[in-house]
Amino acid sequence: MGRFYIAIAVVFIATFLSEKTLANIIIAEAGNSGKTIANAIQSAQNGDTVLIKSGIYKEQSLKLKKSITLLGENLPVIDGENKYENLTVEHDSVIIKGIKFINSGSSNFNDIAALTIQNSKHLLIEDCQFENNFFGILSMNCGYITYNNNKLSSGGIKGKPLANGIHCWKSNHLTITNNTIKGHRDGIYLEFTTQSKFENNRSIKNSRYGMHFMFSHDNFYQHNEFIANGAGVAVMYSKRVEMRYNLFADSWGSAAYGVLLKEINDSKIIGNEFRGNTISIFADGANRIEIYNNLFLKGGWALKVNASCADMQVNGNNFIGNTFDIATNGGLKMKSMNANYWDKYEGYDLNKDKVGDVPFHPLSLFSVIVEKNPPAMLLYRSFMVSLLDKSERVLPSITPDNIVDNHPQMRPYVYDRN
Amino acid sequence: MIRVLKYVAIDILKNKIVIAYTIILALFSWSVFSLEDNAAKGILSLLNVILLTVPLVSILFSTIYIYNSNEFIELLVSHPVKRNKIWTALFTGLSLSMVAAYIIGAGIPLLIFADFNIAILMITAGSLLSVIFVAVAFLCSIITRDKAKGIGLSIMLWLYFALLFDGLVLFLFFQFADYPIEKIVVALSALSPIDLFRILVLLKLDVSAMMGFTGAVFQDIFGSTWGLVFSFTLLALWVAIPFLISLRMFNRKDL
């Protein structure tokens, strides 16, 4: 009997191995009507690889409903001719690598994307490029997808509407790393997307937000760069979002900010660098936010916190070269504000422990005036206003005295974002 | 007229105060730019200094200078020289020396450290500011023969423009906070050359993004090329009107 079992086992292993080794490579060639991508996908079995030779493919709307690998050789181009959805994937376990998607269609009613992924899990999209598309990558109801090292740019075609670069709807466990997104509406857009990780992405010159969270909880993003977007990152209606070591720079304009926190709870903003934003962090209805060890450099307002925020902690940050370090519209209560470095601090340190001996009130009279009366900004740098500010600092009467740093640092912290 | 101008210029040079003023301005500017690592911040600090000192020195020095050269003026009037020319020559001489002091003192460091466009803007607007306050000084000193009164008047005017005006504007902001007063404020700012200068520089320094709606209104009005032309015309009017009034009064005055 033992032999019989062994024989059966051998047969099983042999068939299993042959299945594996017999996975085919199917070739698609541009300009060869018999070897289109559509044909290749059709003749492929699960586990096969479709090798796409370089060239331009205009195959209208491609559909992929098999577990195969699409591999591009020398960056073949799939052209949507400004009319079609270049490729739609509706199957688990797909790999797409080294393909360039251009000119997807656009619409005011439908979400047309260069690459749409629906109801699928375990995908890898790597080393692809996207140019002048409406949506770049659109994932709906997906999980465990990795987007790595893709380049997306849009806005090259005049009059073509813009949509989001990487758009994730109702997805979870995404890993989005090393992507560059330029010229879209939102660089990365998340809605109902949870437990995802974003690392080393660059989101540049997108017309609205570098990254946009809506109802997306438990996400973690670090070492990303958001430069010259309409606004850096908008975090709205989300919980437990962690932002670490990111760079938010050059969001400069009348309604621009580095980070917008709107109705968000229990989140952490740690070790980030904010440079040259009109408002570095704008918070409205944000509760229990921890803002630690960030660098606020050369902004208009470093923190603009509405009184609707509660239990915020602002500790160990550097505030350097901002017009206003903090502004609020009313009786703001902070949980703690401690041991920050403020370049406007004019106190002394007698015992040389590098902590200033007099508390610092970062809320200046002028910022209170401007908050109540925005046109008063016209008097910025006027001698009269500087005078009022100075006297208010010495003897606070109008500004609330509960916004105070009792241990202001004498020297700025040295952070290493990496 | 050229000859009178020459006398005035030499006299002012001999006075040495203008030279001291130049040196002080230069010291300020150089130290501001070498202390601040960021040129834009340096410009803002320098702007504060300029807004205070340039009008003050221009108006005080000119007023006192005119009172002191009363006898010289009387002597000239007894000669066959037109009154128009005497007054204009005095004005030109004082203005030129103030402008030269400003350009040498603040203009050179500005050109070296600051962005070229902003430097040019600050140099032209600052020079105009000097001339404006020389013109106001001429008006002050012709209004009254009493030296103490005249100097007092010029100090009051300086206080008004440098300090009080902003206070009044702030007061207005609070009184009319419920009304859309942006456009009125634009009109108001034209009433003080110091404010006009400050706002022009601020708009160029990108601070306008922080001013919200008012900033947008201002950027709209002052930010464009026509806006620049318009605001410089306003500044030029600030020179022309006080001076022409003083000229008229001087022509009719019984010396």
Image (cartoon, coloured by chain):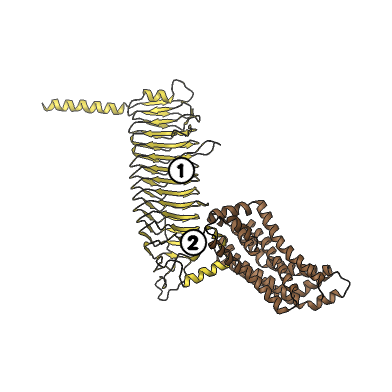
Chain colours: A yellow, B brown
Residue A397 relative to residue B241: left or right? left
Residue A351, given in percent of the width and then of the height, sits at 40, 76
For the residue pair A112 and A109, the one nearer the viewer reads as A109
For the residue pair A400 and A258, the one nearer the viewer reads as A400
Q: Quadrant of the N terminus of chain B?
A: bottom right
Farthest residue, direction left: A1
With respect to residue B249, does A247 lie above or below?
above
Q: Name the residue rendered at 10%, 26% in the picture.
A: A1
For the residue pair B239 and B177, the one nearer the viewer reads as B177
Residue that mark 2 sits on = A324
Can you see residue A393?
yes
The amino acid pointed to by label 2 is Phe
Residue that mark 1 sits on = A186
Q: Earlier in the sequence, mark 1 or mark 2?
A: 1
Residue A101, given in percent of the width and then of the height, sits at 46, 33
With respect to residue A84, does B181 lie above or below?
below
Q: Alpha-carbon distance for marks 1 and 2?
A: 28 Å
With respect to residue A259, does A114 lie above or below?
above
The amino acid pointed to by label 1 is Asp
Judged by depth in the image, the label closer to the viewer, 1 or 2, is: 2
